[in-house]
Image (cartoon, rainbow, N blue to C red):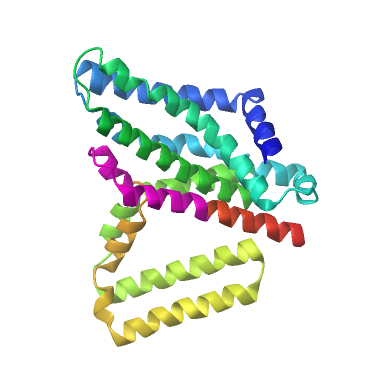
Amino acid sequence: MLAIYKKELRSYFTSMIGYVFIAFFLVIIGIYFMIYNLMFGFANFEYSLSTVTFIFVLLVPLLTMRLMSEENKQKTDQLLLTSPLTARSIIWGKFFAVFTIFGIVMAIVCTYPLIMSLYGSVPYGSAYGSILGFTLLGGAYLAMGLFISSLTESQVIAAVISFVAFLFTVLMEGFASIFPTDNKTAYTVFTVIVLLICLLLYRMMHNATVSLVAGVVGIGGLTAIYMLKPTLFDGSVVKVFGWLSVISRFDNFSSGIFDLSGVIYYLSIIFLFTFLSMQVIKKRRWS
């Protein structure tokens, strides 16, 4: 894993992507920090972080698009797949490398509350709690971007899909509020989601049987619940989308509340998408 980590980390600084990511991230955060905290005099640094969550949609695809897609395109993934390295070592090495780039940004951001303390009293607890939540939010997006990159050979396609997926997570609650709250609409929405999951499984595993079984079980379960107690679906789209929303989990951190469930949620997202990336690697290794 250490060899993969060093290789990936070195590549970010030899190709300028790492410098561009760090520079743009700090510039955008710095602008809001200057306006909110230095010019307007707000003592709460979490206000600045809550307004720049859109930055992940713009910059994380730039950082993650090449993680696996470049290996797939240049066929250097064959070297990785035939090496004694495990899929876990490959994926975690790449993830920690890209997280290190993001960690450099967050290490610099950690000095901002200290700068604010030169001009007055600063609530350090809420400030650094929001920085922790922001860091975990970034880690979740990086893991998602890594998984998307593992599914394609094109960096452009990986970047576009990541951008669309991240944008959807930002607008997820807004989309959910558009749907009617009746149980029939909820049943239809969840059925479509199950079908999309089945398509994703087939794209990852190229196993029609597994995808078909997952679809039958998922849709069959939804249909059984809908037939027995349809009232359970009333308003469930908004609730489920709100619970799944990656961005909404940061609201408590941005309000100065340390949310342990949010920490567990972000860590779960990181482990889930790194696990899925490992399965893609294993499938290619044995195919």
Q: Is residue 112 magenta?
A: no
- x then y, percent, for residue 136: 42, 41
Q: Quadrant of the N terminus?
A: top right
Q: Does the magenta stretch mainly form a helix, a strand or a loop? A: helix
- x then y, percent, for residue 266: 41, 48
Residue at 37% x, 36% y: name it.
Answer: 132
What span is colored magenta in the figure? 249-272
Query: Is there any visible trace of residue 208 in the rendered image?
Result: yes
Judge by depth and name the residue closer to the eye, 46 or 230: 46
Determine whether, in the image, residue 81 is placed left or right of residue 153: right
Judge by depth and name the residue closer to the eye, 88 or 33: 88
Determine whether, in the image, residue 71 is placed left or right of residue 234: right
- x then y, percent, for residue 23: 48, 21
In the rendered view, would you say 273 is above or below 196? above
* Residue ranking furthest to the bottom: 228
In the rendered view, would you say 22 is above or below 258? above
Q: Is residue 261 magenta?
A: yes
Residue at 69% x, 38% y: name it.
Answer: 4
Q: Quadrant of the C terminus?
A: bottom right
| Number of marks drawn | 0
- x then y, percent, for residue 155: 62, 41
